[in-house]
């Protein structure tokens, strides 16, 4: 872990077109290196847009983003993809790639444009699958996997890039309880191992259980950012979602109870 | 259970050699298939005993077989590239205005220069308008203000194809029904009759580099088939890499279309067959497509030139074979070579 933030947003604004309204306004945010950071906020608040900006897929209309102190705009596609990996919300794979072939694609930042994966790359893919306990899925076609399996396989593909920063867009959205807890354990382990993890979610309690830091967003702005224990409070969450929200602990686990609309 | 052992390029070669051998055998046998001196078969000893037979085989059938193989490779290679990059298994090289552009260029040349138009002029015009069709599709796609780039390119291609198809209608309407119209109609049906070594040489500078690019980028094609977000996060320069691999595919397809006319179904069927048999990984599906495409078109062309006393347009034979094959392929669920 270094003092340098993994990701640093300085006055970042974004609009999808020149004439379209801004979706994000004046975002200033430092994501701590090696921390697990959860981004929370109502639907359409710009969480995915924020992740896409961090990935470099979108370019800010104002402000600047730095990755470990280097200007994101100054990094080449290949350099950036060795640092930042992404698990998208719904990965659609149109052809019958096997899981192993798909995970192998994660090696692309380390393979030249006209190159082919080497035996070492293939081994890295096998290892990446094994590290998440998915070895037995290796020869299955990706489109035939269940939602939970696919999400974990997508995660294995992203980790095979060897990223220092992992972005996940609502990773637990379609997972059952068992897969959600499996995912949570993996994210916790990644955090302990020093990978910077940033994920968006609609599940404050799940986020509180796993994250070191929380970012709360509303109306395209960051309204609160800090250590989870200070951000995960009834008043902050109520303000974010504009409904009364009670926060409690049951057997040491955080629980969130939404109230009536006012 | 341990995962399937990693498959290095060497093992791809091991799985593909039967197709390579099949292509060589089909091409060699095709040398002796034809209608001289009698229907269907030329006895090999005639190569030494009959000067005319030797000339037919070496100066007519061999270049035609080479051209058929290049045509099949171009169409199948173009098909798998377009299907992969557009993430749509129903796309074929005829999209993007290439085929209809070529058809318009060829018919315009025949109308302008008369039925005596030299093959080179017709090919040149076809190639030119194939590229115009592609460029127009791209320009329209850029100007459309909705949808992702795949949808926009396909819509642009559809519009341009319709435009050129209407243009072909106008040219046919204007053409002399006794002289030019039959030539145009025959060209549009597609075929390799009268192909010479010269035509093969015209094909090479487009087909070889085009297919070389496609082959070199075959693993990269896997990445380009993923959604933008993922492909981008994996470090691909999306626009540039897609443009490069599409340019390679289109160069080969438009040159092949210029020489042979519109040959349907190969570009659609063959990639499906290759993926079904060898799996989706483009590292093996692309070379397999090229080889299967070559074998298929060489066989179809054998039928086209030898089944009847007169030439059957190749486009009709490939459509029959392709459509029948497609139905069989889509109704059979399993057909996969063990790894």
Image (spheres, rainbow, N blue to C red):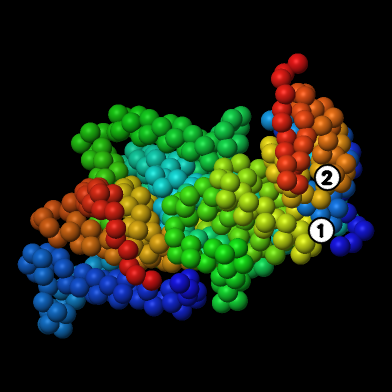
Give the farthest residue toward the left. B38
Q: Quadrant of the N terminus of chain B?
A: bottom left
**Callout 2: residue from which chain?**
A
Q: Position of residue B7 (x, y in %)?
A: 48, 74
Answer with left or right where residue B110 lies relative to residue B101. Answer: left
Answer with left or right where residue A160 lies relative to residue B320. Answer: right
Q: Position of residue A99 (x, y in %)?
A: 50, 61
Q: Quadrant of the C terminus of chain B?
A: bottom left
Q: Nearer the viewer, residue B191 or A154?
A: A154
For label 2, the crowd category at 10 Å Cα-Cα, with few meaning under 14, some 14 to 19 and many 20 or more, is many
Residue A44, quarter of picture: top right
Mark 1–mark 2 distance (CA, rounded to whole Å)? 15 Å
The image's mark for residue B129 is: none
Give the farthest residue toward the top. A262
The residue that label 2 is drawn on is A228
The residue that label 1 is drawn on is A34
Measuring 57% from the left and 50% from the top, which residue is drawn there? A178
Position of residue B280 relative to residue B101, above or below, is below
Measuring 57% from the left and 42% from the top, which residue is drawn there? A174
For label 1, the crowd category at 10 Å Cα-Cα, with few meaning under 14, some 14 to 19 and many 20 or more, is many
Q: Nearer the viewer, residue A92 or B134?
A: A92
Position of residue B175 relative to residue B72, above or below, is above
Answer with left or right where residue B310 lies relative to residue B145. Answer: left
């Amino acid at each position: 872990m270094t003092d340098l933030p993994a990701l640093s947003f300085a006055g970042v604004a974004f609009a999808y077109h020149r004439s379209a309204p801004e979706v994000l306004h004046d975002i200033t945010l430092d994501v701590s290196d090696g921390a697990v950071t959860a981004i929370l906020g109502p639907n359409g608040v710009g969480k995915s847009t924020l992740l896409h900006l961090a990935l470099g897929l979108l370019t800010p209309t104002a402000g600047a983003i730095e990755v470990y102190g280097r200007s994101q705009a100054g990094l080449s596609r290949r350099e950036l993809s060795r640092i930042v990996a992404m698990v998208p919300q719904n990965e659609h794979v149109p052809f019958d790639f096997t899981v192993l072939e798909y995970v192998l694609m994660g090696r692309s930042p380390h393979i030249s444009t006209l190159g082919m994966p080497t035996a070492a790359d293939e081994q890295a893919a096998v290892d990446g699958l094994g590290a998440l306990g998915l070895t037995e899925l290796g020869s299955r076609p990706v489109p035939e996997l269940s939602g939970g399996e696919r999400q974990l396989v997508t995660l294995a593909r992203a980790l095979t890039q060897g990223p220092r920063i992992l972005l996940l867009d609502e990773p637990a959205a379609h997972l059952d309880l068992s897969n959600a807890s499996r995912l949570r354990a993996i994210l916790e382990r990644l955090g302990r191992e020093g990978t910077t993890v940033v994920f968006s979610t609609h599940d404050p309690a799940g986020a509180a259980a796993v994250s070191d830091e929380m970012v709360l967003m509303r109306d395209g702005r960051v309204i609160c950012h800090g250590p989870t224990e200070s951000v995960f409070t009834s008043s902050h969450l109520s303000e974010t979602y504009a409904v009364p929200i009670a926060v409690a602990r049951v057997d040491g686990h955080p629980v969130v109870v939404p109230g009536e609309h006012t | 259970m341990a995962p399937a052992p990693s498959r290095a390029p060497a093992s791809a070669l091991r799985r593909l050699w039967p197709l390579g051998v099949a292509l060589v055998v089909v091409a060699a046998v095709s040398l002796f298939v034809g209608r001289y001196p009698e229907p269907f078969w030329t006895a090999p000893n005639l190569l030494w005993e009959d000067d005319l037979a030797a000339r037919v085989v070496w100066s007519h059938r061999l270049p035609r077989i080479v051209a058929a193989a290049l045509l099949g490779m171009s169409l199948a290679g173009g098909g798998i590239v377009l299907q992969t990059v557009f993430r749509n298994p129903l796309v074929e090289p005829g999209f993007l205005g290439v085929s209809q552009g070529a058809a318009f260029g060829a018919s315009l040349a025949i109308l302008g220069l008369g039925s005596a138009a030299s093959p080179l002029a017709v090919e040149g015009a076809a190639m030119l308008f194939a590229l115009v069709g592609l460029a127009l599709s791209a320009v329209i796609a850029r100007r459309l203000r909705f949808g992702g780039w795949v949808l926009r390119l396909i819509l642009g291609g559809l519009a341009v194809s319709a435009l050129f198809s209407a243009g072909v209608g106008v040219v046919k309407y204007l053409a002399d029904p006794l002289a030019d119209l039959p030539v145009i109609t025959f060209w549009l049906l597609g075929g390799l009759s009268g192909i010479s070594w010269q035509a093969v040489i015209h094909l090479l500078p487009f087909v070889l580099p085009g297919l070389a690019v496609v082959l070199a980028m075959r693993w990269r094609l896997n990445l380009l088939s993923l959604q933008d977000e993922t492909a981008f996060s994996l470090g691909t320069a999306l626009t540039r890499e897609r443009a490069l691999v599409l340019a390679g595919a289109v160069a080969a397809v438009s040159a092949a279309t210029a020489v042979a006319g519109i040959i349907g179904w190969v570009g659609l069927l063959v990639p499906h067959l290759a993926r079904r048999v060898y799996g989706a990984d483009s590292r093996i599906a692309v070379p397999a497509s090229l080889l299967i495409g070559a074998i298929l078109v060489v066989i179809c062309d054998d039928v086209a030139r030898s089944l009847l006393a007169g030439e059957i347009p190749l486009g009709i034979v490939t459509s029959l074979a392709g459509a029948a094959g497609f139905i069989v392929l889509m109704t059979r669920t399993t057909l996969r070579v063990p790894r």
